Amino acid sequence: MQLKNKRALLVGASGGIGQAIATEMDKHSARLLLVGRNEAKLQQLQESLNGDHQIIIADLNTGEGRAAVVNACQREGLDIYISAIGVLDFNLYENQDSDRIEQMMATNLVSPVLLCQQLIPLLLKQPQAAIINIGSIFGSIGHPGFTAYCASKFGLRGFTEALQRELADTKIKVAYLAPRATRTDLNSSAVTALNEALGNAVDSPQQVAGELMKILAGNRKQRYMGWPENLFVRINSIFPGLVHNALVKKLPIIRQHAAL
């Protein structure tokens, strides 16, 4: 898809991955609707870009916030919807605050799904359109210490897969991007320490943005980032017991860092 003058809605634009995506799409002359709750960060992002972009301050976990976004898209038009919204809470499930669990489910799954439903009629009016949901490797591999987060991302992956098939006879491309560990403000000090203890590679937001640009430019409907992470996704789908045993061996390290 050629991005010049395409109107793209980017939710979660004030986050690290969102900002990197906005920067890349700006280079390709897309016209962005930048959505987030942090007005200062959105204004700073808008000022750093070269193109004609708009910001929308909205809480997508509310009906009013989603309505504000839909109204803006109705006024401006819409060709591309990118969901980069997400929150993360690393903790053992039995110790996790129920409000944090509910927040993750709402932010990572329920709100993007509800917003997407309202945007599909607008996208169907275009000769070429795209929906891209940014999930996680943990949307394919259940990982101790991230149980609720995994549940939300498993749901987003399933939603995207079903929607791909439901819209296969339309001109809307539906795609799913699954980053591995990424260097953003979502990571607490405990998550950073865990990645170091387990020897996990950590990508930059710019690397994630680069993979998203490949999706927009090509025909692939899903991309799983990182080696050996993308291999583990395949192994887990065929031989889940192998991945299960490998992760269970790491439980003492995970429990130690979840208590930080």
Image (cartoon, grey):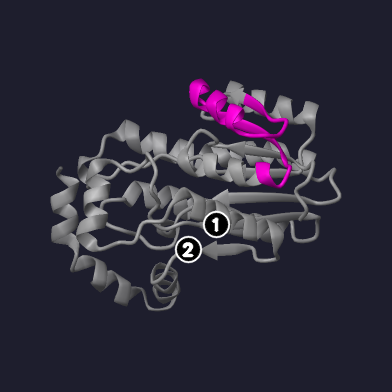
Q: Secondary structure at mark 2?
A: loop
Q: Earlier in the sequence, mark 1 or mark 2?
A: 1
The image position of residue 77, as x and y in percent, is 79, 34
Rounded to the nearest whole Å, what is the CA distance between mark 1 and mark 2? 8 Å
Rendered view: 146 above or below 115: below
Q: Can you see residue 162? A: no
Marks 1,2: beta carbons within 8 A: yes
Q: Which residue is mark 1?
A: 177
Write the residue at 73% across / 42% down.
Answer: 30
The circle on residue 225 is 2
Quadrant location of the C terminus in the rendered image: top left
Answer left or right for 74 relative to 139. right
Say which of 74 and 165 sits in front: 74
**Can residue 31 be found in the magenta stretch?**
yes
- The residue at 52%/21% (across/down) is 39
Q: Give the residues drawn in magenta, as a range.
A: 26-55
